[in-house]
Amino acid sequence: MSKIPVLEIFGPTIQGEGMIVGRKTMFVRTAGCDYHCTWCDSAFTWDGSAKADIVQMTSDQIWQQLKEVGGNQFDHVTISGGNPALLAALDIFIDLLQEKGIEVALETQGSQYQQWFLKINDLTISPKPPSSKMKTNWEKLDYIIDQLAINGRLAHTSLKVVIFDREDFQYAEKVHQRYPEVAFFLQVGNDDVEEVDAQQLSRHLLNKYEWLIDQVVASTVLNRVRVLPQVHALIWGNKRGV
Amino acid sequence: MSKIPVLEIFGPTIQGEGMIVGRKTMFVRTAGCDYHCTWCDSAFTWDGSAKADIVQMTSDQIWQQLKEVGGNQFDHVTISGGNPALLAALDIFIDLLQEKGIEVALETQGSQYQQWFLKINDLTISPKPPSSKMKTNWEKLDYIIDQLAINGRLAHTSLKVVIFDREDFQYAEKVHQRYPEVAFFLQVGNDDVEEVDAQQLSRHLLNKYEWLIDQVVASTVLNRVRVLPQVHALIWGNKRGV
Ligand code: SF4
Ligand code: SF4
């Protein structure tokens, strides 16, 4: 049985971002990414620094650990990365969770399609803006959105763009104009993943959030949109595993 | 033509709470409430203090003012109160907005049903917990949720309970158990509506938010739920009209 490279299993906690912000959930973080964004807040999933912590697990093993850690206090699991869309093996794991009555959320940057996207309850496609120094593959993204639309999955899908500067903002406008029918989220970028003082960071991020709201308010292109901070970063700062 | 008592029209800004938190929207605040919650953060809508500011407006007049203030920068209007469910006249206004391609959100405490609930795009029913000193009319609430369910509107509906203390939390568990099929939100109560220092307030509210998350995490009753702060209060504190 094919295995899944797992770096962290934790929770219950809340989802801090995007379409289901605030949702009580467990997290399973997978290793590996085909991108290397300049500001990646989970670079340990791909830069080799946490290589020794990666555990190759079967779906059953992950499920056992979820139950051990989360007991009867959850009915939702978020699969994050890295880029979990690299892992064809997630197919069986998603089936297993849903058989157990668990809803599944997953985030990916949209560089790769998987058939199992169509089963995800809350799918976030988060293409990376210019500040990441990554280049969006628009044909690939078109294909993914197309597949989701054709299969009637748009109610379970959102696009999310993280914003660090004006150029990122213009990129967000472009994404929303290209896929106007997909729920669209703008998120404040955390440009200070080294700050250890959660209070300092929270003040800084709230200022940036206010700036982002001002930009969106002034735009006539971005109307049917939602603007959010990372609420977990406001509470816990840059701490991992919460 | 029957008129609507309006206290404020402002925006665009973001929705700070609940099921569409972060959504770019305009606000129309109506006057009047059948409750008088101890901690009401918009008591000026019913305590007489802003009586002189109430303007009786037709739907067309409200629409004109929305366009004047918001230009082409919005496609969503939030009707808040007070309790807008007291106003049968909103029926025509909601029709007018939707004819213009505008989505409509509305919040009410669930003390009163209106046929036009069935047209609201994002309907929040927010029954008040013990700390409010108000008493929930459960038969009325049952009736409202029933009507929404029968008419296939649950995808457009959420329940939201504001939490100030443990007793409120137990009330929230009861509400969620009574209506398990309705999207359920827990929200941090703002117990300091007098604080003028937004930074102080935001720190205080984030601490309370963390407490609330801890309660929800520990509960086996509250799994399919979302826990949120009031994000506008984190940015702007107790300022009105933002
Ligand atoms: S796509 Fe995500 S995980 Fe991969 S490098 Fe970028 S931010 Fe990090
Ligand atoms: S129901 Fe809402 S507006 Fe009315 S008193 Fe309570 S909090 Fe205030």
Image: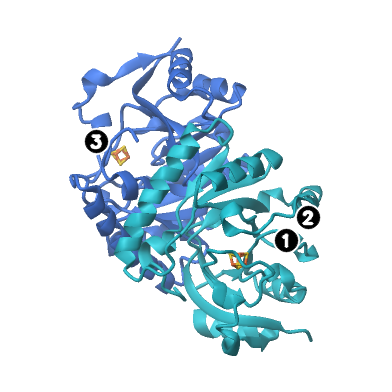
Chain colours: A cyan, B blue
Q: Which mark is residue B214?
A: none
Is disc 1 placed on a helix, strand or loop? Answer: loop
Q: Which residue is mark 1?
A: A111
Disc 3 C-beta below 8 A from ligand 2? yes
Q: CA distance from mark 3 to mark 2?
A: 52 Å
Q: Which is more toward the observer, A173 or B77?
A: A173
Q: Residue at x 49, y 75 (%)?
A: A11
Disc 1 C-beta below 8 A from ligand 1? yes
Q: Position of residue B174 (x, y in %)?
A: 41, 60
The three-letter amino acid code for the residue at tag 1 is Ser
Q: Which residue is mark 3?
A: B43
The three-letter amino acid code for the residue at tag 2 is Lys
Q: Which residue is mark 2?
A: A140
Chain holding disc 1:
A
The answer to which image quadrant residue B112 occupies is top left
Q: CA distance from mark 1 to mark 3?
A: 50 Å
